Image: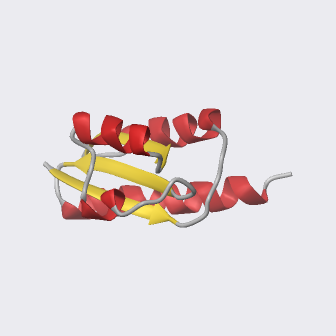
Amino acid sequence: MITKNLVRKGFYADSVALMRVARELSALPGVAEASLMIGTPSNKALLADSGLMAAEGRAARPEDLVIAVKAKGPREAQAALDQAAKLLSTRSTDS
C-alpha cells in the first residue's frame, strides 16, 4: 500500500461535499481508503492516526484542503488524486 496526499491551497468546500468525494475515491479500483479534510491541526492528527498522512499533507495550513488516499500502488493513488481534483473542479463550478 502507498499513501499520497495532495494539498489544494486556500480551497474550501463543505464537509458533506468532501465526504461524497472521499466515498467516490474509495470506490475506485485499487483504492483502500480516501479522505478529504481541511488542514487544521486536529484534522491532520486524524489523518495521521488513520495512516493517511504523507509529507505533503503535513505542510498544509488551516486554510488548505488535504486530499489523502491509501492505494495498492502509485498509479492507483495518483489516479485517485487526479479524480479528486476533477470532482472538486466540477462541483465548484456547479450552480
What residue appears at the point 65 percent right and 47 percent down from the top-left corner?
13
Question: At 25% from the left edge and 42% from the top edge, which residue is drawn?
Answer: 48
Displayed quadrant of residue 45: top left
Q: In the rendered view, does 86 fall on the left or right side of 82?
A: right
Number of callouts in the render?
0
Residue 37 % position (x, y): 48, 44
Q: Looking at the image, which is closer to me, 94 or 12? A: 12
Q: Position of residue 90 (x, y in %)?
A: 68, 58
The residue positioned 38% from the left and 39% from the top of the image is: 26
Q: How did the renderer colour the structure?
A: secondary structure
| Relative depth, front residue between 51 and 23 | 51
Q: Specify whether 27 is left or right of 85.
A: left
Coordinates of residue 88 in the picture (x, y in percent): 61, 56
Is 55 on the left or on the right of 17, as rendered? left
In this rendering, does residue 49 appear at all?
A: yes
Q: Could you tell me if residue 27 is visible in this image?
A: no
Q: Residue furthest left?
A: 1
Residue, far right: 95
> Which residue occupies the foreground of this view, 59 or 35?
59
| Picture residue at 27% right of the left edge, 44% below the top | 52
